[in-house]
């Protein structure tokens, strides 16, 4: 069983302008699932993210285990889920847990210590690049794309 | 067009992509818009009224345009500025002008990607200045170098295109002959349908949909212009929202971490430090916008006055502060002002011995930047700018030079007013109040309510400014000819073909056909229909 994921996106800003103005509308999303362990303990950030979501969009902030359980649960008719994670390792964990994703969008990973420029606004540490390679190795397609209006770049060609 | 005029036009294009004279996002909302850019180009070419009319017509294509977080699907400023310049010099009709402007917009987005790529090269210099605590020199990587690059990327292509395009366009158009010009006008009459359909894609939802038709019908049958139409529907929106029941969402209580950022401190910063910092942010936040740190260098530049005041005699702390503020940040300009105020307050606490490490700054900045942009981007680019533009657009298309000027003043006042208020909120009341402000629901209600008025005025735009007229006539007898447009369509519903075309474009976009393809389909319909005599 699988819930209907209309977009799986790696983006460490989670809910922001591109997601709210473009992706939510493009995908007709009804809810956003954020898989991030530390966030589940941070009520301030949880409230902030809920406040940033457009009206009518439910936000679920879950640990990776909870996300696996939730996403592999009974599908609800008419439900369109946007899945957001900060780093590729979470995509791996969800795949390991049995969540089916055929395509992952690489949206943004901010530059910080230990990370190097990967492509445009995506920076990644060597471990994160390895994780991206492993995800691609499992036959999951991955595209760099900020908003649906822009052309998607195949991440395979960026490695 | 003289060399001097062409140079001025190149300069306007550069300015519309620079921080001057209205600020980072201020320029993007003002000079960057074809309605305003058209007026300025008209002034340069000695015909401000024509410039305003052409610019406003080109603006129809870009009403619902949104660039969020570093994405730039098309460049309306080049379409507006160069399109208006060429149209005035070539003596083109406004509708034909629109047809040549749209391809220019597609070319323009190349400069944006180029600039964001090149500006990445200035990040190491900003880092080096931070390592050495050279707070007075941040303007070099943030303003001087990136603006030189932007000037080179924008001024020269636009200047050359205006000069040579202007010199040849007249002869070119004469050579084209009447039939090509007629078809260009048919294309230009139809193209606003694509711009409007793109806007509909964002707002044509749920209960608000009926208002699209209501606006269309009022404008089509009763010829209500856009300005009164917007005012009527503003009232209807407010009534509608008052009737809706309030939604009560349960809120979890705060944990400790939020409380720790509450400002408890002596005021070390002077008001002018704050205002200057905030002003730097409003003007230069995106001056060195680059793929690596996005607005990181701009954020450091904004913090310079704070750092100078607080760590005047402490080079070590000055270095550390500079290094923590040159990091990655990407948010919306006016709402991001809250982060400027909050960060200033936290630095003030830290200077008084509060236990705040780099990580606590980073986590609050990176935590707030996404959600603030999540509200700010749709609010400005999806609500305030398009509604205000539409409000004044009807006047502008009729040739009122005052319309773009009034638009600019109103927008600037609202934008800077909100930004300043949020900066003060962040500085004086801290993160908890920022959160409560975002949670209040008012903002979401405004965004949702804008769907109603937005649909209505967009419907009005279809009736007023999408022009599709059939040229089909049926010979009934030797003397009488049945003119399909005036004797059937106009009698049933004026603008019915415009409505049909707009809904067709919307349907294509909804089917995930890209906007470029939709434009090409509309052009094909116009060309084929024009050639075989349907239009």
Image (tube, helix red, strand yellow):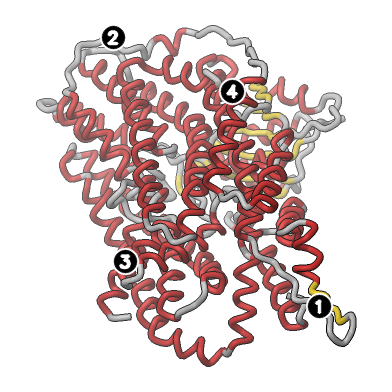
Q: Name the residue under label 2.
A: B264
For label 3, the crowd category at 10 Å Cα-Cα, with few meaning under 14, some 14 to 19 and many 20 or more, is: some
Identify which residue is drawn at 36% across, 57% down: B16
- Could you tell which of marks 2 and 1 lies nearer the N-terminus? 2
Q: Which of these two is toward me, B13 or B532?
A: B532
In the structure shown, which secondary structural element does the residue marked by tag 1 occupy?
strand
User: Label 1 lies in what chain?
Assistant: B
Q: Is label 3 or label 4 in front?
A: 3
Q: Which residue lies furthest to the front in this view?
A: B479
Rounded to the nearest angstrom, the CA distance separating label 2 from label 3 is: 53 Å
Quadrant in the rendering for residue B346: top left
Identify which residue is drawn at 82% across, 79% down: B481
Q: Indicate the position of residue B422 as horizontal and vertical percent values.
A: 37, 26
- Could you tell which of marks 1 and 3 lies nearer the N-terminus? 3
Q: Name the residue under label 1.
A: B473
Rounded to the nearest angstrom, the CA distance separating label 3 from label 4 is: 47 Å
Pick the quarter of the image with the N terminus of chain B: bottom left
In the structure shown, which secondary structural element does the residue marked by tag 2 occupy?
loop
In the structure shown, which secondary structural element does the residue marked by tag 4 occupy?
helix
Q: Is residue B93 left or right of residue B512?
A: left
Rounded to the nearest angstrom, the CA distance separating label 1 from label 3 is: 43 Å
Q: Which of these two is toward me, B415 or B273?
A: B415
Check chain identity for marks 1 and 3: say if they share one: yes
Say above or below: B347 vs B352.
Answer: below
Q: Mark 4 points at which residue?
A: A50
Identify which residue is drawn at 24% across, 34% down: B277
Q: Is label 1 or label 3 in front?
A: 1
């Amino acid at each position: 069983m699988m819930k209907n994921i209309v977009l799986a996106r790696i983006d460490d800003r989670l809910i922001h302008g591109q997601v709210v103005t473009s992706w939510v509308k493009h995908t007709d999303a009804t809810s956003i699932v954020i898989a991030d362990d530390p966030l589940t303990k941070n009520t301030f950030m949880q409230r902030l993210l809920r406040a940033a979501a457009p009206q009518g969009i439910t936000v679920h902030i879950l640990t990776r285990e909870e996300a696996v359980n939730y996403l592999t649960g009974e599908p609800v008719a008419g439900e369109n889920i946007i899945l957001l994670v900060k780093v590729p390792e979470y995509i791996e964990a969800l795949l390991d847990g049995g969540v089916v994703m055929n395509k992952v969008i690489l949206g943004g990973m901010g530059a910080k210590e230990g990370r190097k420029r990967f492509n445009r606004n995506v920076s990644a540490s060597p471990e994160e690049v390895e994780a991206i390679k492993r995800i691609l190795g499992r036959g999951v397609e991955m595209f760099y794309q900020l908003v649906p209006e822009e052309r998607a770049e195949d991440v395979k060609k960026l490695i | 067009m003289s060399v001097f005029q062409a140079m001025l036009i190149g300069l306007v294009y550069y300015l519309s992509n620079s921080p001057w004279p209205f600020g980072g996002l201020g320029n993007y909302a003002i000079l960057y818009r074809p309605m305003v850019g058209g007026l300025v180009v008209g002034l340069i070419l000695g015909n401000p009224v024509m410039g305003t009319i052409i610019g406003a017509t080109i603006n129809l294509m870009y009403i619902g345009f949104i660039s969020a977080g570093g994405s730039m699907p098309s460049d309306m400023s080049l379409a507006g500025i160069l399109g208006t310049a060429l149209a005035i010099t070539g003596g083109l009709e406004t509708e034909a002008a629109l047809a040549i402007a749209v391809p220019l917009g597609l070319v323009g987005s190349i400069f944006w990607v180029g600039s964001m790529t090149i500006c990445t090269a200035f990040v190491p210099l900003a880092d080096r200045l931070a390592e050495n605590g050279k707070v007075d020199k941040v303007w070099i990587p943030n303003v001087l170098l990136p603006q030189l690059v932007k000037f080179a990327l924008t001024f020269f292509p636009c200047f050359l295109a205006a000069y040579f395009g202007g010199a040849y366009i007249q002869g070119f158009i004469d050579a084209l002959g009447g039939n090509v010009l007629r078809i260009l006008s048919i294309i230009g009459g139809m193209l606003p349908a694509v711009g409007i359909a793109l806007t509909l894609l964002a707002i044509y939802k749920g209960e608000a949909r009926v208002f699209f038709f209501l606006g269309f019908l009022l404008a089509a049958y009763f010829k209500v212009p856009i300005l009164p139409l917007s005012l009527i529907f503003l009232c209807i929106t407010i009534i509608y929202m008052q009737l809706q029941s309030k939604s009560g969402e349960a809120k979890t209580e705060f944990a400790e971490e939020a409380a720790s950022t509450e400002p408890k401190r002596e005021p070390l910063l002077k008001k002018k430090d704050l205002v200057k910092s905030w002003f730097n942010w409003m003007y230069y936040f995106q001056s060195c916008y680059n793929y690596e740190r996005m607005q990181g260098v701009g954020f450091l530049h904004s913090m310079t006055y704070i750092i100078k005041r607080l760590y005047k005699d402490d080079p070590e702390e000055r270095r550390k502060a500079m290094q923590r503020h040159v990091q990655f940040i990407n948010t919306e300009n006016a709402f991001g002002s809250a982060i400027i105020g909050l960060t200033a307050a936290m630095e003030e606490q830290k200077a008084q011995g509060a236990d705040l490490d780099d990580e606590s700054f980073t986590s609050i900045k990176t935590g707030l930047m996404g959600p603030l942009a999540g509200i700010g981007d749709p609010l400005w680019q999806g609500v305030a700018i398009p509604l205000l533009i539409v409000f004044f657009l009807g006047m502008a298309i009729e040739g009122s030079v005052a319309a773009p000027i009034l638009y600019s003043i109103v927008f600037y006042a609202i934008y800077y007013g909100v930004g300043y208020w949020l900066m003060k909120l962040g500085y004086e009341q801290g993160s908890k109040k920022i959160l409560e402000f975002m949670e209040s629901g008012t903002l979401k209600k405004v965004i949702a309510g804008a769907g109603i008025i937005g649909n209505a005025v967009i419907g009005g735009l279809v009736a007023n400014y999408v022009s599709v007229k059939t040229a089909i006539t049926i010979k009934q007898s030797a003397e009488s000819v049945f003119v399909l447009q005036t004797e059937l369509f106009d009698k049933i519903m004026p603008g019915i073909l415009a409505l049909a075309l707009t809904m067709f474009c919307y349907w294509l976009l909804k089917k995930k056909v890209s906007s470029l393809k939709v434009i090409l389909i509309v052009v094909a319909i116009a060309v084929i229909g024009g050639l075989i005599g349907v239009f």
